[in-house]
Image (cartoon, coloured by chain):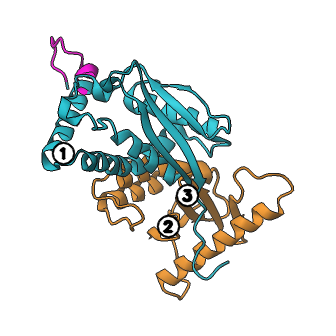
Chain colours: A cyan, B orange
Amino acid sequence: MSRQGTRLDTKNVNSELFTLTYGALVSQLMKDYTNVEDVNKQLERMGYNIGIRLIEDFLARTGSGRCYDFRDTADKIQMGFRIFLGVTPTITNWSSAGDEFSLQFESNPLTEFIELPDHCLNLKYANVLTGVLRGACEMVQMEVTSWFAQDQLKGDTVTELRVKFVKRLEDAIPAGED
Amino acid sequence: MTVHNIYIFDRYGTLLYYYEWNRLKQSGITREEEAKLMYGMLFSIKSFVNKISPLDTKDGFLCYKTSKYSLHFFETPSSIKFVLTTDVGAQNVRQFLQQIYSQIYVEYAVKNPVWQNNKPIKSELFKSKLDAFVKQSPIFVSKAN
């Protein structure tokens, strides 16, 4: 791929290309939809479609089996972020019931060059991630919801993605059997 | 040793893919019917096997064997079910199915942009890669050879 004598670090260039591509995607969505809420929704849907594929890749790479509990799930989600985005979020703020936790990002590769203009403060810029989590977990019989509790783009010190377990989805029963 | 056929089911029991190699005798019913019965049987075996297990099962149902053939079952955490029938002497088929999943299904079916969740796999590339992968494995040594 890279020619000899090139001083560019290919790995770094790829991640910047990825960041910029995502930025272009979001800004195009902002042009296509007048309503910021619609953009958030579209990003989430895109993420969902990514998630339902990504989970298969994750399972194939890690060979991991079913989770015993939600803490196990949290570890695997963390591992997923490391594999696919190269960042390791910290798992914190467990709820007492153990069905809710936060992923804290010191840096988010999606938002590296981003500054939100005033008119789109409601934009959840990295909302694609919530969709990815929903899609991926749904494929392994778990319904989760997630949302951004804190966001560096909005002046918070860290980016915090809160993940909540909703319910277990059951295997489908074939027609004619009970 | 030989491989007879493969079924791939999704979580709803849809037959995603079917292919046969050395299958000399047909069941005499349509493919759809056969797939439905196969899925129903696996579903029942799976749930009953777990029910009568003296200890909590981890993987549960793995395979069954008759005097003429073995049926091997591998299910991913995402509920994709791989079913391979071989002759009775085949070894390490479970590992082989795991490889089919990670090296063929994920690479050539899921990563294909036209892939749709829960729809049968139509990709020719997937078909030829799977065929080649099965044919090069030690489990597949055609009776003709």
Which residue is the site of mark 2?
B144
Dot 3 amino acid type: Ser
Q: Is residue B30 left or right of residue A126?
A: right
Question: Do tags 3 and 1 sit on the same chain?
Answer: no
Above-or-below relation of B17 to B91: below
Foreground label between 2 and 1: 1
Which residue is the site of mark 1?
A29
Dot 1 amino acid type: Leu
Name the secondary structure under disc 1. helix
Foreground label between 3 and 1: 1
Q: Considering only order in the chain, which callout, 3 or 2, is on the residue closer to the N terminus?
A: 3
Q: Marks 2 and 3: CB-CB under 8 Å? A: no
Subunit bearing disc 3: B
Q: Where are the magenta residues, as a range?
A: A2-14
Distance from the alpha carbon under mark 2 to that under mark 3: 35 Å
Foreground label between 2 and 3: 3
Q: Check if residue A7 falls in the magenta segment.
A: yes
Distance from the alpha carbon under mark 3 to that under mark 1: 34 Å
Q: Residue at x 57, y 79 (%)?
A: A175
Residue B35, percent across and down?
53, 76
Residue A121, percent across and down?
26, 33
Which residue is the site of mark 3?
B79
Dot 2 amino acid type: Ala
| Crowd rating for badge 2 (residues with CA inside 10 Å; few <14, some 14–19, many 20+) | few
Q: Residue at x 51, y 39 (%)?
A: A163
| Crowd rating for badge 3 (residues with CA inside 10 Å; few <14, some 14–19, many 20+) | some
Q: Provide the major secondary structure of the magenta segment.
A: loop
